[in-house]
Amino acid sequence: MLQTQTNEESLRLENQFCFPLYACAKEVVRQYREPLEPLNLTYTQYIVMMVLWEFGEMTEGELGKKVHLDSGTLAPLLKRLEKAGYINRVRPESNENKLLLSLTEEGERLKEQALGVPSRMQGCIPLSEEDLLLLRDLLNRALSGMHDNYSRRR
């Protein structure tokens, strides 16, 4: 709550920081549907694939940290990506507690098709490039700070 707000004012939707952030994120995800449809990917699956395209083979835990998803959310998503033929999920004999993820050849080829998605999404948020970079930096700082606060409380 801002210092100048009364308790009642703090409950107004227009005074919330979280609501426009939530609504904007929801709208951006909605706008990704059309360009991702030919790839047979949801937005969250696309995020996972981008991480695998960038970093290659990794464990489910490493992936979860990068995309800020827990195993309960990630597991069904990874099963669908495996069923689609985009990734392999393997439990190494040396450590069956870990799930190792890697791209299939089809998953690697999908990257070529995905190259057009960012340009199709350009202009999705009607802000100047300078404002978009500032927004991204502010959101990254906020996210980092929230994770730091959460880690300290645990």
Image: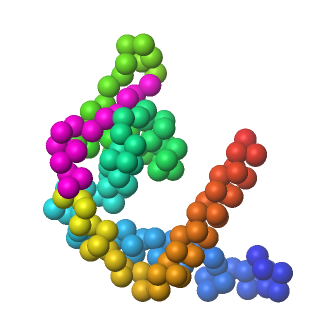
Q: Is residue 82 visible?
A: no
* Outermost right residue: 3
Locate residue 146 relative to residue 86 in the image: left or right. right
Say which of 96 and 4 sits in front.
96
Say which of 100 and 20 sits in front.
100
Quarter placement of the N terminus: bottom right
Which quadrant of the figure has residue 31? bottom left
Q: Position of residue 112 (x, y in %)?
A: 20, 55
The structure residue drawn at horizontal position 48% and vertical position 38%, both measured from the top left corner, is 62
The structure residue drawn at horizontal position 46% and vertical position 21%, both measured from the top left corner, is 97
Q: Is residue 28 visible?
A: yes
The structure residue drawn at horizontal position 32% and vertical position 55%, both measured from the top left corner, is 46
Total marks shown come to 0
User: Above or below — where is 47 with respect to 23?
Assistant: above
Which quadrant of the figure has residue 102? top left
Quarter placement of the C terminus: top right
Which quadrant of the figure has residue 107? top left
The structure residue drawn at horizontal position 78% and vertical position 80%, both measured from the top left corner, is 2
Is residue 110 in the magenta section? yes
The span picked out in magenta is 98-112
Q: Position of residue 79 (x, y in %)?
A: 29, 38
Q: Position of residue 41 (x, y in %)?
A: 25, 56
Locate residue 146 relative to residue 49 in the image: left or right. right
* Outermost top residue: 94
User: Above or below — where is 75 with respect to 135?
Assistant: above
Locate residue 22 relative to residue 59 in the image: left or right. right
